């Protein structure tokens, strides 16, 4: 599972808000929703966020090993 909890921390550190992402960088609210609820996004999205935030992938996402149910 990929979680995007670090994205919100990195945004706060960089002074970037959801409003900035949607209005300055044209990131859709539906994409922000998918990130908020750790749903799948493509690597182009991750690349775009890394460029906007001037950070690395590990500053946005964390991989957690799937557990057997």
Image: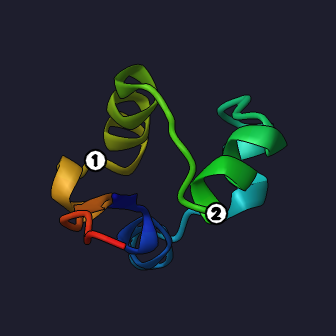
Q: Residue at x 17, y 50 (%)?
A: 56
Front residue (pair 1, 52): 1
Q: Is residue 19 left or right of residue 43?
A: right
Q: Determine contact: label 2, label 1, CB under 8 Å.
A: no
Screen quadrant of the N terminus: bottom left
Where 35 falls versus 25 (above or below)? below
Quarter of the image for residue 3 reads bottom left
Q: Could you tell me residue 21's position as x and y percent?
A: 67, 46
SS category of the residue bearing label 1: loop
Q: Is residue 15 left or right of residue 20?
A: left
Quarter of the image for residue 25 reads top right
Quarter of the image for residue 7 reads bottom left
Q: Could you tell me residue 13's position as x and y percent?
A: 39, 78
SS category of the residue bearing label 2: loop
Circle 1 is placed at which residue position? 54
Q: Residue furthest top?
A: 44
Q: Residue at x 37, y 73 (%)?
A: 69
Circle 2 is placed at which residue position? 37
Q: Is residue 27 left or right of residue 45?
A: right
Instruction: Name which of mark 2 and mark 1 comes first in the sequence.
Output: 2
């Amino acid at each position: 599972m990929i979680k995007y909890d670090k994205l919100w921390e990195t945004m706060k550190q960089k002074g970037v808000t959801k409003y900035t992402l949607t209005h300055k960088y044209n990131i859709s609210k539906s994409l922000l929703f998918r990130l908020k609820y750790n749903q799948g996004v493509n690597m182009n999205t991750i690349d775009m966020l890394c460029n906007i935030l001037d950070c690395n992938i590990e500053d946005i996402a964390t991989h957690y090993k799937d557990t057997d149910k």
